Amino acid sequence: MNQTSFVLKGDICYSAGPNELYTAPDGFLVCLQGQCAGVFPALPEQYASLPLLDYSGFLVTPGLTDLHVHAPQYTFRGLGMDLELLDWLNTHTFPEEAKYRDLDYAETAYRRFVDDVRAGPNTRACIFATVHPEATLLLMDLLEESGLVTLVGKVNMDRNSTPDLQEISAQASAEATLAWLEAQAGRYQRTGPILTPRFLPSCTDGLMERLAQIQQQHHLPVQSHLSENQGEVAWVRELCPSSSSYGDAYDSFGLFGGADCPTIMAHCVLCTQDEIALMKARGIYVAHCPASNTNLASGIAPVRRYLDEGIPVGLGSDVAGGTHTSIFRAMADAVQVSKLRWRLSDQARAPLTAAEAFYLGTLGGGSFFGKVGSFAPGYECDALVIDDRRFTPAGQRELSQRLERTIYLSEDRDIAHKFIRGAQLF
Ligand code: GUN
Ligand code: FE
């Protein structure tokens, strides 16, 4: 997987903003040392000597970013989908995650997850592992080997779980986190750590304080869950009576964004006015997870509002709240639930378009990783070559329409080639 320089020819689509979809039929994407030099209708003379990968007739898009996924939950997708969040966590999620203490179990399960994601359209992901440092390292090793670029979190939880999963104290949780950080330091090129307090109900005040110190000392990004489900939000109100909102509770510990604390909050379905203002002030990234929010009866996040406010938003599969890892699937889900929200409760704000959903799943979430998710000059060259002939009749050439149908119809088997930072995975 040498990082390399080449020209990729095909029917190219990419976003440069929520409403800026660029298309280049029979275009040329130039990759120099893993970075995009631009997309051109005709190949500029200066690049004529680079190797040409001719994918004429295939769709070429940026790789997709899954901004929120639980790797250990891949094993029980599609189970308990008649439950709401808190019952689903207790009945299925916590018992399954407890199994990752066993490294043999973890290796088999994580290998399947990594192999499947590698074969699909996602090139980047922000991943929850479990509380177990050894199994988390094993997951990171497998991800590194896969060629995917990911941020992975050893989960922190020292209350309100089952005895076989939850950590015995704030101190034990913090020490395990530090040991994990030390073990992974310097070990990877494509895989990094992200601090992962599961959600407020799982973390004592003492643990949140320790994690804030670790965040500052190690300059780590943070991921967690926010205002997902009614039962959960009511519970947080009881647990944090002095906080004005769920987000304010994270903020009171210093784990809610800000200059040196890039933070992803999954869901953000039920955020209040003040909470949204705080998210905006702190630069919080929203991981919108429409399939999960439907399956666990959480509701529909106000994504149009977040976009109007300039709050950064990407898409998450939230496996196993969601059942499929493909972020193309999440794009279709995002459009569908936005229409229900518009029809049933919020007619002042228009539903999402396919182009906006494509933006969310590429540049929207990708930007958490830096210059990722677009083919504009200077972006890291993550690219998919998609064979859409299975569902696109010959002669249907309008690229925006082919892209929309790919969002709704593509499956992993349609991803013919995949490049990450210019390295070809297949
Ligand atoms: N909140 C706390 N843990 C979880 C989880 O594993 N999945 C989802 N969807 N929400 C959570
Ligand atoms: Fe989640």
Image (cartoon, rainbow, N blue to C red):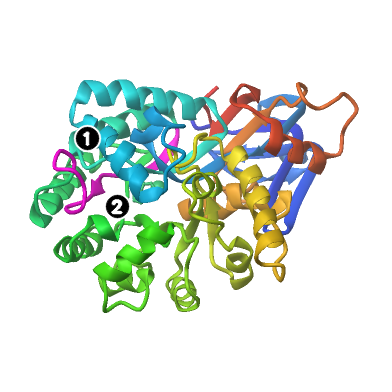
Instruction: Give the amino acid at mark 1.
Output: Ala
Residue 198: give its label.
2
Residue drawn at x 34%, y 50% is 86
The Cα atoms of the two marked residues, 2 and 1, are separated by: 14 Å
Q: Quadrant of the C terminus?
A: top right
**Does 47 sit left or right of 397 as displayed?**
left
Residue placed farthest to the right in the image? Answer: 395
The answer to whether the residue bearing label 2 lies less than 8 angstroms from the nearest atom of ligand 1 is yes
Rendering coords of residue 334 (x, y %): 62, 49
Element class at badge 1:
helix
Residue drawn at x 26%, y 58% is 201
Residue 133 can be seen in this image: yes
Which range is magenta? 148-165
Residue drawn at x 68%, y 33% is 7
**Does 293 sit left or right of 238 as displayed?**
right
Provide the residue designation for mark 1: 98
Element class at badge 2:
loop
Residue 226 can be seen in this image: no
